Amino acid sequence: MGKVTITNHPLIQHKLTLLRDKNTGSKEFRALVSEIATLMCYEATRDLPLEEVEIETPIAIAKAKVISGKKLAFVPILRAGTGMLDGVLALVPSAKVGHIGMYRDPVTVKPVPYYCKLPSDISEREVIVLDPMLATGGSAIDAIDQIKTFHPKSIKFMGIIAAPEGLEALTTAHPDVDIFCAALDERLNEHSYIIPGLGDAGDRIFGTK
Ligand code: PRP
Ligand code: URA
């Protein structure tokens, strides 16, 4: 079973409260999503493999650590996942980026995929999937299904708010995927929106409602 981490760092929790507030406008909302993603990325990359190299400091030869191999690929789920991208690239600027496009059908709440473009060397990379909302889990499960067909070294999911229903569905469908979220909320409402959640993440990031 994959590991589930709820990142309860005070800075993340404070920013999350501002994010949930319905009076927070798009400009501040975007900045907060990005800042939370940076802080969460620190935790999600904790186990990246290191290797030893030899370098010369101004004083002496030293053995030191660098991240080994081809490193990371970030894969945001369109649209709202792109709001987290700048934040994670601030920590790992050399990472490659793939995109998966899907939206939830408003009636069935099933994901409707419309785009997939992944780095060509993804099989040599550790993938972190980005999407702020894990509601029913359908979008994350489908995105990870698609990514797995390209056989990356590993896959993690980084969200901001999860519903218990989505967490259960994702851990059941993909038990090998470690999950990082800033909050585990109460439940879904009758429209499969997270309670209390933050509303529609894509609309709040892009000001489309
Ligand atoms: C939101 C969110 C997730 C999905 C979560 O996207 O960003 O992708 O819903 O719901 P699920 O866990 O029930 O699948 P949405 O479908 O609103 O698309 P958008 O980002 O393009 O607005
Ligand atoms: N997608 C969102 O953006 N918010 C929710 O609460 C559920 C799905």
Image (cartoon, rainbow, N blue to C red):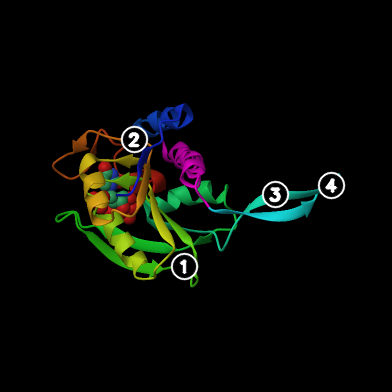
- State the residue position of label 2: 183
Q: Secondary structure at mark 1?
A: helix
Residue 147 place in picture, x, y as percent: 36, 65
Q: Amino acid at mark 3?
A: Ala
- State the residue position of label 3: 64
Q: Is mark 4 within 8 Å of ligand 1?
A: no
Q: Say above or below: 174 vs 124.
A: above
**Inter-mark Cα distance, 3 to 1:** 27 Å
Q: Is mark 3 within 8 Å of ligand 1?
A: no
Q: Amino acid at mark 4?
A: Ala
- Are there few (<14), some (14-19), or many (20+) residues within 10 Å of tag 1? many
Report if the CB atoms under discs 1 and 2 are less than 8 Å apart.
no
Residue shown at the point (49%, 67%) measured from the top left: 124
- Are there few (<14), some (14-19), or many (20+) residues within 10 Å of tag 4? few
Q: Which mark is residue 60?
A: 4
Prevailing SS of the magenta stretch: helix
- Are there few (<14), some (14-19), or many (20+) residues within 10 Å of tag 2? some
Quadrant of ligand 2 in image: top left
Residue 31 place in picture, x, y as percent: 49, 40
Residue 163 place in picture, x, y as percent: 25, 40
Q: Which comes sooner in the sequence, label 3 or label 1?
A: 3
The residues colored magenta run 24-48
